[in-house]
Image (cartoon, helix red, strand yellow):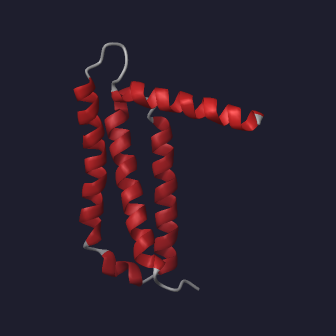
Amino acid sequence: MAVMAYLHKLLDYIFQALLYAVGLGKGAIPTAAAINWVLKDGIGYLSKIMLAKYGRHFDVQPKGWRLLADLLENGSYALELLTPIYPNLFVYLGAAAGAGKSAAGLIQVSICSQKIS
């Protein structure tokens, strides 16, 4: 029970830090925060669209691509964890993390249907 309470407080702190990093705090304009958030997610989706045309290349060495996708995804999560620490770089860190997660997801889905042995 104490672990769950600790995790709840930790997630609450992270969520508050992210909202502050986006710009929702101390008299900020919510429209600017919304533009930052859309820009961050838009760059992630754009990277997925640009990488999709290289999908046929993922058939060559699926184990290597899977490893790259996992490393890219972990690196993207690390970038997301840095956003509360560096709130002035939120858009850049968030966009890079979103692009990395989108690319990793696309690679994982592309090689998921193959039998990796």
Left or right: residue 105 versus residue 115 is left
Q: Which residue is drawn at 25% across and 42% down?
A: 39
Residue 69 lies, with reference to residue 100, above or below; the image says below
Judging depth in this view, the residue of 62 and 4 nearest the camera is 4
Residue 87 lies, with reference to residue 59, above or below; the image says above
Left or right: residue 66 versus residue 50 is right
Left or right: residue 72 versus residue 5 is left
Residue 73 lies, with reference to residue 9, above or below; the image says below
Q: Which residue is drawn at 33% across and 25% down?
A: 23
Judging depth in this view, the residue of 71 and 112 nearest the camera is 112
Looking at the picture, how far across and down is residue 29, in whole percent? 25, 21
Indicate the quadrant where residue 104 lies.
bottom left
Judging depth in this view, the residue of 41 and 97 nearest the camera is 41
Residue furthest to the front: 1
Give the quarter of the figure containing the N terminus. Answer: top right
Give the quarter of the figure containing the C terminus. Answer: bottom right
Q: Is residue 40 visible?
A: yes
Residue 58 lies, with reference to residue 14, above or below; the image says below
Residue furthest to the top: 27
Q: Is residue 85 visible?
A: no
Q: Residue at x 46, y 42 (%)?
A: 80
Count the marks: 0
Left or right: residue 49 versus residue 104 is left
Looking at the picture, how far across and down is residue 93, in whole percent? 38, 40
Q: Which residue is drawn at 31% across and 52% down?
A: 44
Looking at the picture, how far across and down is residue 37, in whole percent? 30, 38
